[in-house]
Image (cartoon, rainbow, N blue to C red):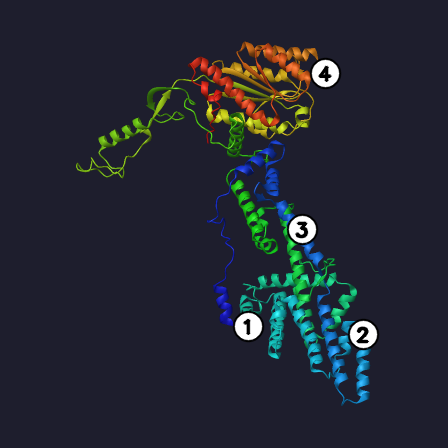
Amino acid sequence: MADVWSQRRASRYGRYDGGRDPLAPPVDLSEALDAIGEDVMAGYSPERALREFLRRGGQDQQGLDDLARRVAERRRELLKRHNLDGTLEEVRELLDRAVLEERKQLARDAMMDDGDRALREMTLDSLSPNPAAAVSELSSYDWQSSQAREAFEQIKDLLGRELLDQRFQGMKQALENATDEDRAAIDEMLSDLNELLEKRQRGEDTQEDFEEFMRKHGDQFPEEPQDLDELLDAMAARAAAAQRMLNSMSPEQRQQLMELSAQAFGSPALMESLARLDGNLQALRPGEDWYGSEQMNGQKGLGLGDGTGVFQDLAELDALSEQLSQSYGGARMDDLDLDALSRQLGEEAAVDARTLQRLEQALREHGTLQRGSDGQLRLTPQAMRQLGKSLLRDAAERLSGRQGQRESRRAGASGERSGATRAWAFGDTEPWDVTRTLTNAIVREAGEGRFTDGRAASASERGSRPRVRLTIDDVEVQETEERTQAAVALLVDTSFSMAMDGRWVPMKRTALALHTLIRSRFRGDHLQLIAFGRHAQRMEIEELTALDAMYDKGTNLHHGLLLANRHFRKHPNAQPVLLVVTDGEPTSHLEPDGEVFFSYPPHPLTIAYAVRELDNARRLGAQTTFFRLGEDPGLARFIGSMASRVEGRVVAPELDDLGAAVVGSYLGDRSGFARSSMGGGYSDWFGGRGFWVGG
């Protein structure tokens, strides 16, 4: 037996837990970043947005809510299917069989004294309807039928095996048809186990004590614990489940089982050993649930061992439910017990949970979230770029009308090529001239007369180099004509109505898409984001995307235009482009003393101030586009008159198309002034609907 346990220890396998699985495929973060970014722009904290995505899951990925729902359904199914009468029903069946066989034998036995037969029949007729009492009354009965005696002995054997199966899973089957030697081995194991646990309570146990116990009795513990704590954890969990099962029975059921337990294996010694074991386990693991109970009203009766297993399942399901809720302090996806999830819901559920774990780990490790100087978690610049690219790609697909097709990059996107080349300098984005670059490398290496590994080449080797090595000094780029820069002011309405009417997130998505386009493809342009509500303020993209919905009344277009014109004056050599996203007429303006004036309906002075600053933008040469959100006729008339005053445009997009409309307008304005200054260098870039997203 010692050799068997040693071999088990040497070949113990389990799930890989040395960190991230090196064979696991990479997770796709794009869907998660889109969802998290959407929630962040709706006002969620990044941490909450991450939790919400894990809770909902993805398009083809079950989330925590789905898994928690399945756990709850599994729990309800267990309670609905079972009842706790299984062992008592088996006892009743065996008792009825024993009595019936005995009556048959009495009827057949012609040699029996009539008085003796009458006494026996009276004993059988007067048996208590309570199975436990009936078994006790028949404990000293002298059975005439061998079949009856066998059935009655099976009751004692069944009770012993069930009681052991409650504490040691699989004992009911293992001890079927057990011999006296098998029962003696169990008695010895229980005695040694209790002594070991009592040593632990006194603080006197050692690892050698545990290993000696396992050498003697290791075949009784298929869980293969590696130390006494592992053994304690497994046994205490099952013993607590057995106690909860007993707590869940009716008083009558409990009483009958306690009376029947004295008949287990025909001796009260087993019950005494198990009671001692339960006391030791409860003392060493008081944190287990020893007092809970459940209501079971199903049709399928549970024996003591199987019932304990069901109660263990219920406890495991409760633990999984708490883990999946992630509602406790410091909750992490790593808390999920994947083995338990696989046991209860199947391997597919464990795969879904493992994918969510890897998603959370990847999002945290790949620079998605960072803590700012104020202690708040925010999306990192890297995450903002990824989200911006996704939004820009969505805008591109809407512009092109070719959803799902490959974006195409058109020549001239970086300026028209002049035919000349020059040495590469830091910051250049022009395409390489491959022919000139390779020629420079070949000429340089020929002049140096050296191989790429630094070894000097012989005269015979110089003409047969294995490869050419490029250095940064070899690189030449194709020169393009200088393109006109733009000073872009995007004014976004952050008034009360934008938040109330569901326009807050589309506004943020639009700003981020335009910001990404300019930062990635038109780095020479100067973008200023201006939010205008009761007053206006310049914002960085990180501030705007994290901005909570504002419920202050007021639409201060006047202040927003003041800031836009200041931006245009700071860049006198750039073409001004003014883009205004709003869903209401101006209702506030700045007074000369800097105070905000508010009036609804709009005061004529507020309109006058806004018109004056719009005229100033026109005098600075701004190309103006208004994006009108909503169908209010008064707003439509006002925006229309403002746009016609400065020869601007009005676009009334659906919310889903707002980003594409703003990006398209910017590109259209750009192609217009670039074409006039460069002779058509950008004419096809937007007009031909070609759209390329860098990345």
The answer to whether mark 1 and mark 3 are in CB contact below 8 A is: no
Mark 1 or mark 3: which is in front? 3
Q: Earlier in the sequence, mark 1 or mark 3?
A: 3
User: In this figure, which residue is indicated by the disc labeled 4?
Assistant: 601
Residue, disc 2: 128
**Callout 2: SS:** loop
Which is more foreground, mark 3 or mark 4?
3
Horizontal arrangement in the rendering, residue 441 relative to residue 341 (left or right): left
At label 1, the amino acid type is: Lys
Name the spot of residue 290 as percent of width and height, x first: 70, 60
In this orientation, which residue lies closer to the viewer: 523 or 74?
A: 74
The residue that label 3 is drawn on is 72
Q: In the structure shown, which secondary structural element does the residue marked by tag 1 occupy? A: helix
Which residue carries the number 1 mark?
A: 216
Provide residue 388's location: percent of width, then percent of height.
Answer: 53, 30
The residue located at (40%, 26%) in the rendering is: 429
Q: Are marks 4 and 2 in contact (CB under 8 Å)?
A: no
Q: CA distance from mark 1 to mark 2?
A: 44 Å
**Which label number is shown at residue 272?**
none
Q: CA distance from mark 3 to mark 4?
A: 54 Å
Q: Can you see residue 264?
A: no
* Residue type indicated by callout 2: Ser
- At label 3, the amino acid type is Ala
Find the distance from the CA under tag 3 to the CA under tag 2.
42 Å
- For marks 3 and 4 on the same chain, the one whose residue lies earlier in the sequence: 3
Q: How far apart in space, not on screen, are marks 4 and 2 (Cα)?
A: 91 Å
